[in-house]
Image (cartoon, helix red, strand yellow):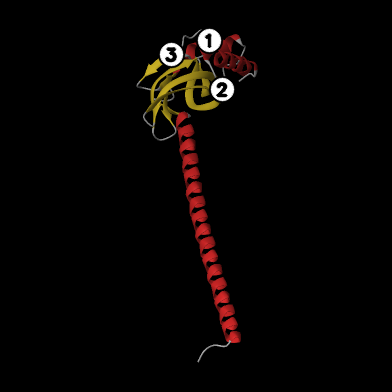
Amino acid sequence: MSETPREKAEAARVRRRWLTLGELLGIAAVVISALTFWNSYRERTTSEAQHQAEQAKGSKLAATLLLKGTPAHDGRVLELAARAEGQSIDSQTIHFPAALGIDPIETSGDPRIERDWFASAVAKARHAAGLKDETGDARLPVLIESRFTADGDSRTALDRYVIGYTTDTSFLSGTRIKLHGLSRTAASKDIRSGQKAIDAAWKTELSSGR
């Protein structure tokens, strides 16, 4: 039985309706696919950015040398070592306040600071400044130039530190100095400015009466 014109028109409307639904479903599928791709891309780029930031942070940390000083031999020596893992000290130059008249000390393969390098000069400077021979804590500013290896690369560091020491006296030996620690105060851009800074710090230390 043939369809009437009215039935044919109704059938056409149904087909058009289904076609529209199909198109909508296709568009929805494309949108979902695009969103999925975008989320994946964003997660990947975020992960890469975080990885690069971590690498940059690790590289910056590797380039920064922080020293720790461990007293040894009854305070006669401070054994120096890098605080961070993966860093090794190759050689160092220790600069003292110019007023002490001590030439820079070079070390290689055995990072350390020895009391005998400066004890006599410090004791004389303290006496000249009118400081009393009594037991107490004191500090000596120094400039330490380090050549070290980090992550397989050779690097250099120039930093100001203070050596912590104690003084006591005896009738026979006079002022005795015992080393007990090392503390970083600041980085220096060059030897000249670093030397100037420790000279000023030493002058302040003596004038403080410690």
Residue 7 at least partly seen = yes
Q: CA distance from mark 3 to mark 2?
A: 21 Å
Residue 100 — which label?
1
Secondary structure under the numbered disc 3 in the rendered image? strand
Number of the front mark, 3 or 2: 3
Residue hosting label 3: 105
Give the x, y percent position of residue 10.
59, 83
Identified by mark 1, the residue type is Leu
Q: Which quarter of the figure is the C terminus placed in?
A: top right
Residue hosting label 2: 138
- At x 48%, y 9%, the residue is 102
Q: Residues within 10 Å of mark 1 (few under 14, many from 20)?
A: some
Number of the front mark, 3 or 1: 3
Looking at marks 3 and 1 on the same chain, the residue that comes earlier in the sequence is marked by: 1
Q: Residue 129's image quarter?
A: top right
Q: Residue 199's image quarter?
A: top right
- At x 65%, y 19%, the residue is 208
